[in-house]
C-alpha cells in the first residue's frame, strides 16, 4: 500500500474537495515531494522505533515505558504535520468560497456518520465493542489470548472513562474552528494561526474531555504493562516474529 500512496492520498482528497486543474497540479507535486521526504527521512525512524519496541519485549514493560512509546508514536504524527504544513497552507490560500462550503459539508457528513455509528451505542454496547477490539489486537500481536489476559482486558473495558460524547463534540468543535480559520485564509496571521491549530488540536479540548483522555491514556499504558507480565513463551515468540516482519518491510521500503 505504501508504494501507492501517491494515488491513495489524492483519492481520499476527492471526498472532501474538488480541485481545479491548477490546484490538482499543485497537490500532485506536493504529494510527490512529501512522499519522497517521508521515504528518505521517516522510515528509518519508524524502523528504529520498532527495533526499540522489540528489544523492550525481553522483559515486562512498565507503565512509564509504554507512555514513552506513546509519546514517540505521537511525535511521528507531529513530524508529518510539520512537513506537510507548507503544502496544506499553500493549498488553503487557493480555495474558493464554493470549495470551503464543500469541505465544511464533507466534514459535517463525517461527524453525522460517526454519531450514527457510535453516538447511539448504550454503555454496555460501547464497552463490549472496546473489549472485542482489544481482544482482536492482542490476538493479532500475540497469536492468542489467555484467560488471565482476557480478564485484564475485561476489567479495562469496564473501568475505562467513556469519552464518546466528548470526542464527537471535539470533532465538531474542530470542524468549526478549522472552517473559521479557512475563512481568514487571506489574513496576515493565517499561516501562523492555522499551523498552531493543526499542531495543537488538544487546545480546544473541553476540560472534562481533556481529563478523561489523559486518564484513559495512563490507564491503557498500565493495562499494556500488566499484559506484558502475562506473556507466555509462545506469545513472546509470536510478537517478536510480527515485529521482525515490520522491520523487514520498513527496510525494503526504505531501500526501494
Image: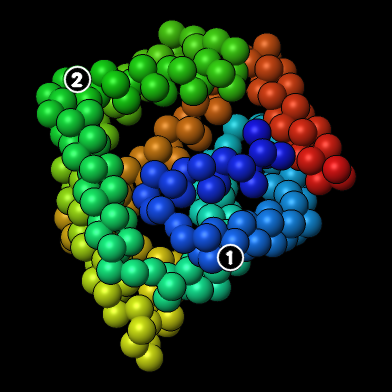
Q: Residue at x 33, y 21 (%)?
A: 131
**Is 4 displayed left or right of 155 in the figure?**
right
Q: Quadrant of residue 113?
A: top left
Q: Position of residue 89 (x, y in %)?
A: 47, 73
Residue 233, placed above or below residue 199: above
Residue 93, placed above or below residue 143: below
The outermost residue toward the bottom is 188
Which residue is denoted by mark 1 in the rendering? 26
**Is 232 displayed left or right of 136 in the figure?**
right
User: Of tags 2 and 1, which is closer to the observer?
Assistant: 1
Q: Residue at x 59, y 22 (%)?
A: 141
Nearer the N terminus, badge 2 or badge 1?
1
Q: Which mark is residue 101?
A: none
Residue density around tag 2, few if under 14, some if 14–19, many if 20 or more, within 10 Å: few
Q: Residue at x 83, y 37 (%)?
A: 252
Q: Position of residue 103 (x, y in %)?
A: 31, 56
* Foreground residue among 68 and 93: 93
Q: Which mark is residue 125?
A: 2
Q: Is residue 231 something one can see in this rendering?
A: no
Residue density around tag 1, few if under 14, some if 14–19, many if 20 or more, within 10 Å: some
Q: Quadrant of residue 62?
A: top right
Amino acid at each position: 500500500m505504501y508504494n501507492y500512496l501517491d494515488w491513495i492520498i489524492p483519492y481520499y482528497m476527492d471526498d472532501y474537495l474538488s480541485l481545479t486543474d491548477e490546484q490538482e497540479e499543485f497537490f500532485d507535486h506536493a504529494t510527490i515531494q512529501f512522499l519522497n521526504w517521508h521515504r528518505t527521512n521517516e522510515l528509518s525512524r519508524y524502523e528504529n522505533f520498532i527495533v526499540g519496541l522489540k528489544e523492550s519485549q525481553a522483559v515486562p514493560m512498565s507503565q512509564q515505558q509504554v507512555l514513552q512509546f506513546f509519546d514517540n508514536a505521537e511525535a511521528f504524527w507531529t513530524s508529518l504535520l510539520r512537513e506537510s504544513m507548507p503544502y496544506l497552507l499553500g493549498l488553503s490560500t487557493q480555495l474558493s468560497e464554493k470549495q470551503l462550503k464543500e469541505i465544511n459539508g464533507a466534514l459535517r457528513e463525517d461527524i453525522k456518520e460517526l454519531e450514527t455509528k457510535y453516538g447511539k451505542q448504550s454503555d454496555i454496547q460501547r464497552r463490549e465493542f472496546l473489549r472485542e477490539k482489544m481482544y482482536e489486537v492482542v490476538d493479532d500481536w500475540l497469536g492468542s489470548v489467555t484467560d488471565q489476559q482476557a480478564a485484564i482486558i475485561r476489567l479495562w473495558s469496564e473501568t475505562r472513562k467513556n469519552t464518546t460524547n466528548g470526542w464527537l463534540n471535539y470533532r465538531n468543535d474542530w470542524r468549526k474552528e478549522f472552517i473559521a480559520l479557512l475563512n481568514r485564509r487571506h489574513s496576515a496571521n493565517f499561516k501562523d494561526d492555522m499551523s498552531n491549530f493543526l499542531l495543537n488540536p488538544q487546545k480546544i479540548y473541553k476540560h472534562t474531555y481533556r481529563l478523561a483522555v489523559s486518564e484513559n491514556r495512563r490507564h491503557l499504558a498500565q493495562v499494556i504493562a500488566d499484559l506484558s507480565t502475562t506473556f507466555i513463551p509462545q506469545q513472546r515468540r509470536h510478537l517478536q516474529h510480527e515485529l521482525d516482519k515490520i522491520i523487514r518491510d520498513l527496510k525494503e521500503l526504505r531501500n526501494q
